[in-house]
Image: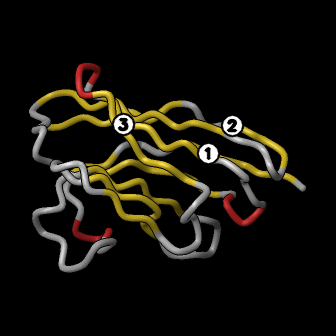
Amino acid sequence: QVQLVESGGGSVQAGGSLRLACTASGRFSSTYCIIWTRQAPGKEREGVARLNGNGITSYADSVKGRFTISKDTFKNTFYLQMDSLKTEDTAMYYCAADCSRLHWTFDVRNLRYWGQGIQVTVSS
């Protein structure tokens, strides 16, 4: 099995920054993609940033230019740097892995492995 553990969430004022981390363990493969997803109250879960095993990244339009996904291969840790945060970025953030069953870039329902989630709150 694969375990994913998020850290780094919290509260910040609009315009501020946070960095989330997702540490993978178990039978995690370097070929797996990682997708950061989020779910706000009353809304569907959505993908915001994707990092493929070959290093190619993709971003949702809502975060493009503000969020950056990266990885530290030696630590098996993936990061989501979030800058210029907006109140609408408030949500539970989850990292997820293995895009082999996805039909499109952010087909999050078909991600195989999930972390437990971490809260990000942006206040005005």
Most extreme residue toward the bottom is 103
Where residue 60 appears, as percent x and y from the top left, is 47, 70
Q: CA distance from mark 1 to mark 2?
A: 6 Å
Q: Earlier in the sequence, mark 1 or mark 2?
A: 2
**Label 2 crowding class (10 Å Cα cut-off): few <14, some 14-19, many 20+?**
some
Q: Dot 3: few (<14), some (14–19), or many (≥20) neighbours within 10 Å?
A: many
**What residue appears at the point 9 percent right and 33 percent down from the top-left corner?**
27
Residue with the mark numbered 1: 119
Q: Amino acid at mark 2?
A: Gly
Left or right, residue 19 beside residue 58: right
Residue 35 tag number: none
Q: Amino acid at mark 1?
A: Gln
Q: Residue 2: image x %, image y %?
A: 17, 37
Which amino acid lies under the numbered mark 3 shown in the image of this protein? Phe
Residue corresponding to mark 2: 10
Image position of 17 (left or right of 36):
right
How many discs appear? 3
| Spot occupied by residue 29 in the image (x, y as percentages of width and height) | 10, 38
Report the residue marked by disc 3. 78
